[in-house]
Image (tube, rainbow, N blue to C red):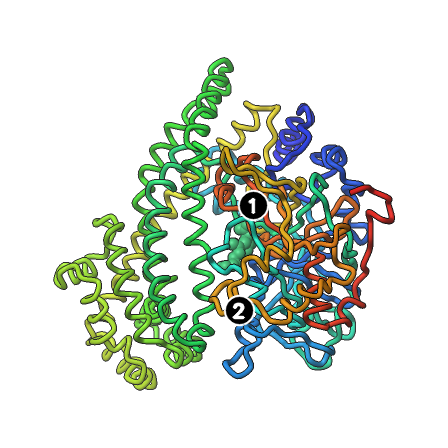
Amino acid sequence: MSKKNQIVSLVVASFCLLAFPLFAGEGMWLPHLLKALNEEEMHAMGMKINAEDIYSINHGSLKDAIVHFGGGCTGSIISSKGLLLTNHHCGYSFVQSHSTVDNNILKNGFWAQSFEQELSNPGLTATFIREIVDVTDNVLGDIPDSLTSKERQKMILANIAKTKADIRLEPFEKIVIKPFYKGLQYIAFITVTYKDVRLVGVPPESIGKFGGDTDNWAWPRHTGDFSIFRIYVDKDNHPAEYNIDNVPLKPIYHLPVSLDGAAEGDFTLVFGFPGRTNAYLPSIAVKQIIEDFDPAKIAIREQSLGVMKKYMVQSEALKLKYASRFARIANYWKKWIGEREGLIKTDALNHKRALEKRFLDRIDSVAIWKEKYGMVYRAFNDAYTINRDYQLSREIHYEAFAWNSQLMRFMHSIHRLASFERDPNAFNSYKQKIDDRVKGFYDAFDHDIDREIFAKVIAEYFKYMPQHMVSPKMFAKWNELGQSGEKMAAFFYDHSIIADSSAFLRLWKLPKDSLMSALHSDEGFNIINDHISYFYDYIEPGYNDNKLVIDSLQKIYMEGLMTVFPKKRFFPDANSTLRVSYGKVEGYTPNDSTTYTPFTYLNGVIAKYKPGDYEFDLPPKLLELYKNKDYGQYADRKGRLPVCFLGSNHTTGGNSGSPVLDGWGNLIGLNFDRVWEGTMSDYYYDIRLCRNIMVDTRYVLFLIDKLGDCHRLIQEMDLVQPKTENKVKE
Ligand code: ARG
Ligand code: ASP
């Protein structure tokens, strides 16, 4: 049997033996395998359409309405004119870039009342998946088992390149090949990327981000987290760079939009691009997340957020400038806190250990299993133990020197330039390449705020950093300056040319040798340059070597789990490829005395309203609409306007903006978050606590129609009433 068939049969056979549990939650499934793996269960849970309606290469199907939005979020097509729906927080930086203090569309909202008013967004892309092909045989077919991890990796890369070259593509198509089930399976995705994606409408931030970071990752939720874009194409309906003459896309398929919404217990399907999960880690890896990695990253971010917040509340200009950055840093800071709490509270470590014990017990009775998998946990322990300091150093290097200090992040580009010092051609061509970036950086550089952030962050960095992993020069400076973050900041920001915009830009004009000799005569530059070299020469390669070992063990373990537990089903970890998660509308009980129902309504928004507040303010027009109960056709049968709802769909970062579909495939909501108690679902999924949070389509429509007065968009959509049409009782 070929390797591909082996793995497919491993997946399918194990699944067919399963006595279908009725309401599944865990799992992010591959669209082209739904028929074999999930369809029966989905029907039992209330799905009316078939797997073929979700993914087909022969006719338009739901997958033709799903896009990877900007590479990190999901969007869906909701009209025959290429209208694209995604989250407010996914369109955030684009809305921010169109905003000024005088014309602050982030604050006031924006509704294009004609095609001409729609705003272009350089750099923004929307990618569709045309076809999904299993290429396991091509990638793994001729690789002998005897190879080392490194040799194997090399052959895999060569096979992937060859496979790509062998597949015939249209000029506007691309192909991406990714590993699944830890590399037991390889799948190719043929994609089409559109580059002219324009902003059409967005509610005021006070609605689109209502509740801000206080309510982020939490339920009950009242956020109208949506924004609307449109894809433009050339006259042949093909992708094109922005051009005034481009026309709206005629999509292969667009989603009907439901006016009926969903009710508790209804089937829900989330279709999107989940980024990354790690569901099959051994207990030692989870322990390191809880004890080492999450605490360090949380502590570093906390420092920089404190500084940013202090300035953002002081002026609208600073708020606008830092809004997107702050949101991005705050988002995962909070996520890690919840994730850590969740892993501890649900006793994830002991659940993992119990699974490990069951695994060992089972393999004990089968000699070949014992031979293949008997060493796996011991090997995991060794590999993860060796890797601990590398991974910790790597993660907090990125936190302290890339995500939180803008100057230090920028220094990575200058370090790269310096690395070409002995190769004038490479030097000059890279210098030219980063010319705009350098000027742009120094023009926008906020010296004082960044300095204050660095002072706090560097002190935290040294608290968590394994000493032997710090570059010797940086470590010596830290000691010389009395281990003071403030003095380190003064050293780099007040006394070095790297933080002096006009001096640096003057140097930048000099020819190579003069530029480099000036830089090398600056102690601050030399230390940071050496520090970054040390990171790339020592920490990064060490981490990558360990990772190869760990990855090959994870692959053996994955195969072992599937073989040893044939009745359990396994989904491939998320890897930014198109997936289907399904569940139902349901609340949860986070502790013994609290139970949450799955819907929130506009009156709940109003109850949280705090006039003038940073996070809980509301636009007067919404208050007016509420006062007059002017909900149009968007109220439910009891006259309430639904705002957000909960489901038991397994989702992760990247699923934001994913359409949520009812059993007939109509749009009922827009995924945007998870609940606090379930944020550990990337590592450990607990059906009792893990819920995804969605905005109700009716709230979206109401805001477009009544708040934005953008009736042309409503007219463009196919509004449907599936429950009325199918006479389903609520
Ligand atoms: N937590 C959500 C996700 O991970 C939404 C984040 C945007 N909102 C915010 N307040 N930062 O992306
Ligand atoms: N808010 C996340 C996103 O942006 C979704 C999640 O992590 O649940 O993709």
- The residue carrying mark 1 is 574
Q: Residue 457 appears at what percent x and percent y?
A: 29, 60
Q: Secondary structure at mark 2?
A: helix
Q: Is residue 483 above or below residue 381?
A: below
- Tell whether 37 sits left or right of 421: right
Closer to the camera, 377 or 730? 730
Does 575 appear above or below 523? above
Q: Secondary structure at mark 1?
A: loop
Residue placed at 36% from the left, 57% from the top?
Answer: 301
Quarter holding residue 471: bottom left
The residue carrying pointer 2 sits among few (fewer than 14), some (14 to 19) or many (20 or more) residues within 10 Å by Cα, namely: some
Q: Is residue 121 visible?
A: yes
Q: Position of residue 613 (x, y in %)?
A: 48, 66
The amino acid on which the numbered mark 1 sits, given as a three-letter code, is Ala
Image check: 387 left or right of 49?
Answer: left
Q: Which residue is mark 2?
A: 93
Left or right of residue 619: residue 386: left
Which comes sooner in the sequence, label 2 or label 1?
2
Residue 540 at least partly seen: no
**Residue sitting at 16 percent across and 63 percent down?**
477
Do the CB atoms of the residues marked 2 and 1 lie less than 8 Å apart? no
| Residue depicted at 57% across the width and 76% down the height | 105
Compared with 125, 427 (above or below) is below
